[in-house]
Image (spheres, rainbow, N blue to C red):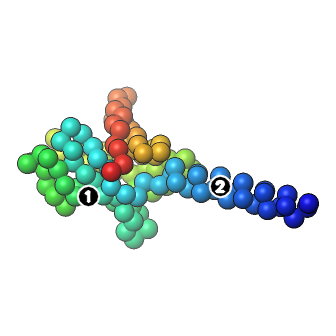
Amino acid sequence: MKNLRNVIVLITISLFSINSFAQSDVVGEWVLGEQNSVVKIEQQDGFYCGEIMSSDNPKAEIGKLMVKELKQTKDTWKGKVYSPKRKKWYDAEFVPKENLLEVKIKVGFFSKTMEWKRK
C-alpha cells in the first residue's frame, strides 16, 4: 500500500512538471500578423533568438532577426523584438500560454500586446 501511494505521488509530480515545462517554452515557429509571417525561435549561445522563416509580405526579409537576447525569468521571458516599420529594437516580455505567445512591448508609459500563434 505504501509503495502504491509513492508511485501515485511520483506520477502526479511528473505530470505537473511536464505541464509547466510545456507552458513556459518559447522555442518553435510562431505565426504573427495579418501577413502570416513565421518567426522561428531557437537557442543560440545561452540566449534565444528568432528570425523570419517565411511571410506573405513581399517586403519581409527572410532570415531577418526579429527576436534577440531572449532569456527566461520566473514566469516570463524577456528580450528584444524588432519593429520593421520603425527600424528599432524594443524591450519586450514574452508570456507563453498554451499555443499562444503574448508579446508585450513597453515604451515609456505606452504598451502594446501582440499575440503570436504556434504554427
Residue at the spot 41% in from the left edge and 43% down from the top edge: 100
In the rendered image, which quarter contains the N terminus?
A: bottom right
Decide: few, some or many residues near mark 2? Use Cα within 10 Å; few <14, some 14-19, many ≥20. few
Place residue 108 in its image quadrant.
Answer: top left
Decide: few, some or many residues near mark 1? Use Cα within 10 Å; few <14, some 14-19, many ≥20. some
Q: According to the image, label 1 marks what residue?
A: 51
Q: In this rendering, is residue 7 above or below 77?
A: below
Residue at the spot 58% in from the left edge and 52% down from the top edge: 19
Is residue 92 shown to the viewer in this render?
Answer: no
Q: Earlier in the sequence, mark 2 or mark 1?
A: 2
Q: Position of residue 52 (x, y in %)?
A: 22, 56
Q: Position of residue 78 (x, y in %)?
A: 43, 50
Residue closer to the observer: 12 or 86: 12
Is residue 60 shown to the viewer in this render?
Answer: yes
Residue closer to the observer: 26 or 18: 18
Q: Position of residue 76 (x, y in %)?
A: 50, 47
Residues under labels 2 and 1: Cα distance? 32 Å
Q: In this rendering, is residue 72 above or below 109?
A: below
Q: Is residue 86 left or right of residue 98?
A: left
Q: In the current view of this chain or complex, which residue is farthest to the bottom?
A: 45
Q: According to the image, label 2 marks what residue?
A: 15
Q: Secondary structure at mark 2?
A: helix
Q: Secondary structure at mark 1?
A: strand
Tag in front: 2 or 1? 2
Q: Which mark, residue 83?
A: none
Residue at the spot 33% in from the left edge and 51% down from the top edge: 119
Q: In the current view of this chain or complex, which residue is farthest to the left?
A: 58
Tell me whether circle 2 and circle 1 mark residues in contact (CB < 8 Å): no
Residue at the spot 13% in from the left edge and 55% down from the top edge: 61
**Which kind of residue does numbered mark 2 sit on?**
Leu
**Which kind of residue does numbered mark 1 sit on?**
Glu
